[in-house]
Amino acid sequence: MFNVHFKILSGFCLAFALVGCNLAPDYVRPTSPVSPDWPVLDQTQYDARTGKISQQMQSASQLSGQANLNTPNTISAGEITWQAFFIDPQLRALITIALENNRDYRVAVARMEQAQALWGVQRGELFPQIGAGVGGGRQRQVLPSSSGNDVSTVTSLYQAEVGVTAFEIDLFGRLRNLSESAFQQYLASAEVTRGVQISLIADTALNYLSLRIASDLLTLTEQTFQSRLANYKLVLERSKGGVSSDIAVMQAKSVLDAAAGDVAQFARERALARNALSVIIGQTIPNNLPPALPLKELDLFASIPAGMPSDLILRRPEIRQAENLLLASNANIGAARAAFFPNISLTAGFGGASTSLGDLFSSGTGVWSFSPTISIPIFTGGSLEANLAGANAAQKGAVAAYEKSIQVAFREVSDALAGEATYRSQYVARSSQVQTSQKLLELSNARYFAGIESFLQVQIAEVEYFTAQRQQVRTVFETFANRINFYKALGGGWDDATPGAQYDMNRAMKNAVQLSDEASNSSLNTSSHPDLKPF
């Protein structure tokens, strides 16, 4: 019995020793389709005192961190966590709530877990499937005898066996490549989840900013309405005294009506912004949030420093996802090539058999079986060739998708850098415009009540002043929105912790890489590509 078991074990060891051939092509990361340096941009500076604009050409990488509206906090590019980037405590609280409650994020996490399970199913094909079985039967036979009387015999047979069922010896790496493909698809789904998380953080910040801006615009419009209402009452009194004409009264009433319409508009916009933010965070906005920083401080977000390398975009989830899918297509080529070669499977088992249940495991009752099977493709109607051609085509498409993702990322970061280079100048100009239009309104009012100007000039000055104020607020929104998009374009926070703790992706990914290393010594293993390991 021992010799039999030793022979079976030796056969398994020999089969595993033969496993090592891999027909997948060697992976070479495609050359980046973009320049290694950020584009050279026009940096504008506006001097409100002299009214002059100066421009200079400068590398976009040197502009990051310089175009700040005030004196913002600055952090290094390698420390961009969402907690460090978003300074406003009220916004931080809302982001934490969103990461706990947002349904889109939950769906993404569930899909990642599903991809992990599918990889586990495929990975299981690499190992022998061992099972045990116990069976028994009784048989009665009736045989004629020479005496003329039938002889009846009853026999029993009991059998117990432990064995391997249809284990494929992976000589040419077909199963390992299929497992690697499933693993890379799991990594890709994890990057999708990361992308959803980053987008959720950015969208929460944008919706929060929209609500803050809508509230400020509503406050501004209500103040404008009250100012115009006071003006209208003065003009109406002057008209009753015969000092002002009916035209002046109608002009004052016209700008008052316009302000009333703006109040209704911005009240609606604030309500819509509040509803949108509630959906993003997955619940109604709590009343016990920390106090918010005033928008006028212009210091809600940290600034990214100058000298930022362009290869930071390789951290973006969609680029890492595209490379994972490229690695998966590489592995699929190896599996398609292996299908042209013989397939060897093995069924084996050992145990005991006896006519008596009590003697089933006694000495001398052992049985064993060893059944190797080899199948060789001879004629498949071209299906194997078509499968390989499809795998090669998919790999070409994956390369193009990877290159396109880099191009899109480069453009988005470059656009954000261009915004950083110009929004400071735009804000300075808008602020100067507000001050100038305010002085113009004060002078126009003084000249009207002195009888020097008509009310038309006051009406024009009021419209210009309100427009300048709105444009200044809009510039604040656009500046902060550009900063948020900058954060998102760089791939968001790169810390190991997953805020909100819906799913510890970092731990799951490290465990997955470890399991993949244990399952296969394939050259496609992600351990040979440390920069591909998420987080």
Image (cartoon, helix red, strand yellow):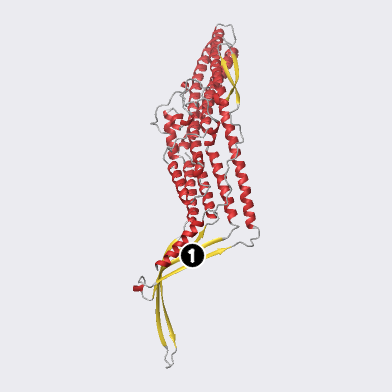
Q: In front here: 42 or 297?
A: 42
Q: Residue at x 54, y 8 (%)?
A: 446
Residue nearest the observer in this picture, 11 or 392: 11
Q: Tell whether 440 sits left or right of 161.
A: right
Q: Quadrant of the N terminus?
A: bottom left
Please give the residue where the numbered disc 1 appears in the rendered image. Answer: 347
Location of residue 403 (image quadrant): top right
Pinpoint residue 412: horizontal percent, then vertical percent: 57, 32
Name the spot of residue 426 as percent of width and height, x first. 56, 20
Q: Nearer the viewer, residue 100 or 178?
A: 178
SS class, disc 1: strand
| Rendered position, 340 above or below 60 | below
Comparing 298 with 349, the one in front is 349
Q: Residue at x 52, y 46 (%)?
A: 184
- Whether residue 252 is visible, yes or no, is no
Neighbor class of circle 1 (other Cα within 10 Å; few <14, some 14-19, many 20+) is: some
Percent position of residue 293, x then y: 43, 24
